[in-house]
Amino acid sequence: MKYFKLTALATTAALALAPAAQAETLRHAIGAASMGGLIDGTEAWADYIKENTDGETEIKIFAGSLLNFTETFTGLRDGIADSGFVVPAYHRAELPYANLLSDMGTAGVDPVAMAGAANEFMFTCAPCLAEFNNAGQVFLGNTVTGPYYMYNQKPVKALADFQGIKVRGFGPFARWLNAMGASAISMGATEVYESMSQGHIDGNIHTLETLDTLSAGEVADYALNQPIAVFIGNSMFNVSQMTWDGLSDKTKRAMIDGASIGHAVATIDTVNQADAILADPAAHGVELLEPDADVKEKAEAFRISDMEAVGTLNRDTYNIADAPEQVARFQELVAKWEKLVQDIDASDVKAVGDLYQREIFSKIDPASLG
């Protein structure tokens, strides 16, 4: 009995002297310092993880400093960052299925519904998840931003105005530019300001908030009030496989569930910011131009034909044998999600996050991801 008492006292003393458990701090890379709603969504994800791990795991966000957008893909594989914002469009050869999804931005114009469809598509597509795993990453979903608009240094509102101009655009936006008669130029988002200021390109296709967040309003004078498509390729919360393998079950669960609210915040923020800029474009450096009838007609014809073109392009050029079937599957998911969002307030972050969580993220087994 005396031995038990002494042991208990010694154990109590040791516990009293032991240091408190330290929070694990993970490094998250996002390629630009000012990304508006995308930063807001990342912060919401980080806050959720800290709260739902009782402070055991914290995310330190390195915005525009640790890795740029093109470096993040390999930086996660190499362990330079624990998690990061990956843009699949910069890595088409390694991520063919993720880019097939990005190509389908013309399938709908509601970013909230498109985000639901995009994430259900990815998490029910084994080769989609495998290509991220093969790159040393764990995929935690896509944020959808948009719609995207074109802004330029010179007025462009009729089809004739598109002739001879060079505009930064990729994926569905590049195809739209080509259909309208312009030349699509591929470059990173953070290169647009310098390229426009030096006259290398005439304009850019992006979310309108980039007039502020990328200072594009300083070098652009006009924006065309013609929504083009949404952008699906924002893989905002990819986690390094090396990091994922060492995380507790609690942290993995929090990362997955937190993605539902992070994607909701980022998507809704970009919609709200676009609405505010359209209401007062001069405050953001541009004059808003209404498209002529020939531009509207051409844009609508492009939207109708583009989905079939996406299937053919990805089958014949990027060697995805089942691309047409995947396109059809995604269109069915878009129709499903357009109905789902009609039953909620799609401007309410909690309502949207809860919908994403119920329909998608709560059903994900962490063991299936890595």
Image: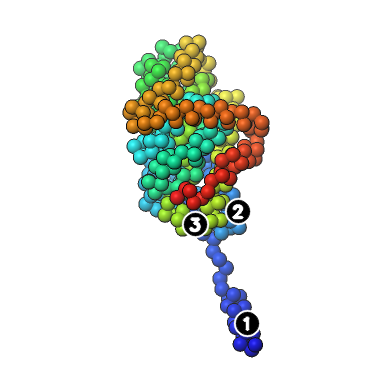
Which of the 4 quarters of the picture holds residue 322?
top left
Q: Is residue 5 above or below residue 256?
A: below
From the viewer's perspective, tell me whether residue 101 is left or right of residue 344.
Answer: left
Q: Is residue 142 above or below residue 169?
A: below
Judged from the image, the secondary structure of the residue bearing numbered disc 3 is loop
Residue 9: which disc?
Answer: 1
Judged from the image, the secondary structure of the residue bearing numbered disc 1 is helix
Q: Residue type at mark 2: give it.
A: Asn
What residue did someone put label 2 on? Answer: 52
Q: CA distance from mark 2 to mark 1?
A: 34 Å
Q: Visible in this render: residue 352? A: yes
Relative to the observer, which residue lies in front, 185 or 217? 185
Q: Earlier in the sequence, mark 3 or mark 2?
A: 2
Residue located 57% across and 29% down the image: 336
Q: Position of residue 111 (x, y in %)?
A: 55, 30
Residue 362: which disc?
Answer: none
